Amino acid sequence: MSSIPYIDIHTHPFHNEIETITVQNIFPGDGFAAFNGRNFYSVGLHPWHLGSKQENNEALQMVEEALEFDHVIFVGEAGLDKINGGDFIEQLRVFEAQAVIAEEYQYPLIIHCVKALNEVIALREKMNPVMPWIMHGYNGSVEITKQLVDKGFLFSFGKNLFREDSKAVKSFKYLPLNKIFFETDELDLNVDTIYEQAAALKEMPVEVLKKAVWTNFNQIEKSLMPGRI
């Protein structure tokens, strides 16, 4: 690849990209396209979409089956949500199961967390995972961010960088470049728009950010796809 690409580490809509590497989030059992060099996938059971214990176990099995495909490279989004997530005990069970899958198969874990940070931290301390855990759609305060950095988390930023008063902006300015990624999530825009906003916030050229995120991506994926890109 002649120039450093943009990387959209978490997106829901399909993007037929030329200059961007995407990691599209799919649900267990969803179909996905053949690998074209840029279209990667994450697969996980979202806390909003839990069913019965049996249904969830079947979905977890489908997560494992999807990981057999080379371009499915993350587990998630998985996580905990005390606002919209349903039975919290079952959320905890399913989240831990996916964290175990991520560790067993050696894939990074994309995390959805709403009002459940203590539980996410507690699980990380219990498991002491080797694989990266990435907080997606991050909007935590600088104080919380410092705590998460000390515990080895990485961070993905999206729409909250456009809100001047958001906690995400302050945390993004605080974080070193080796801890960050960018995402469009459910936004109908190209990730380069987020890079441009982020570069303005960091007061640095977009190309510097592109190089940093490209390096970060290759570091968390180097054991999975050497020489693929």
Image (cartoon, grey):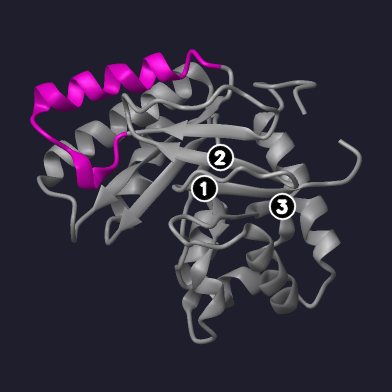
Percent across and percent down for residue 160 are 49, 72
Residue at which label 3 appears: 178
What secondary structure characterizes most of the magenta part? helix
Near mark 2 (Cα within 10 A), the count class, few <14, some 14-19 or many ≥20, is: many
Of the residues shown, which amino acid type is indicated by label 1?
A: His
Q: Is residue 1 left or right of residue 67?
A: right
Residue depicted at 67% across the width and 74% down the height: 197
Whether residue 102 is visible to the viewer of this picture, yes or no, is yes
Residue that protrudes farthest toward the bottom in the picture? 165
With respect to residue 113, does 126 lie above or below? above
Percent across and percent down for residue 70 are 58, 18
Q: Nearer the viewer, residue 3 or 99?
A: 3
1 vs 3, front mark: 1
Residue depicted at 58% across the width and 46% down the height: 9
Of the residues shown, which amino acid type is indicated by label 2?
A: Val
Whether residue 152 is visible to the viewer of this picture, yes or no, is no
Residue at which label 1 appears: 10
With respect to residue 176, does 167 lie above or below? below
Image quadrant containing the C terminus: top right
- The span picked out in magenta is 45-69
Near mark 1 (Cα within 10 A), the count class, few <14, some 14-19 or many ≥20, is: many
Label 1 sits on a secondary structure element that is: strand
Percent across and percent down for residue 135 are 47, 52
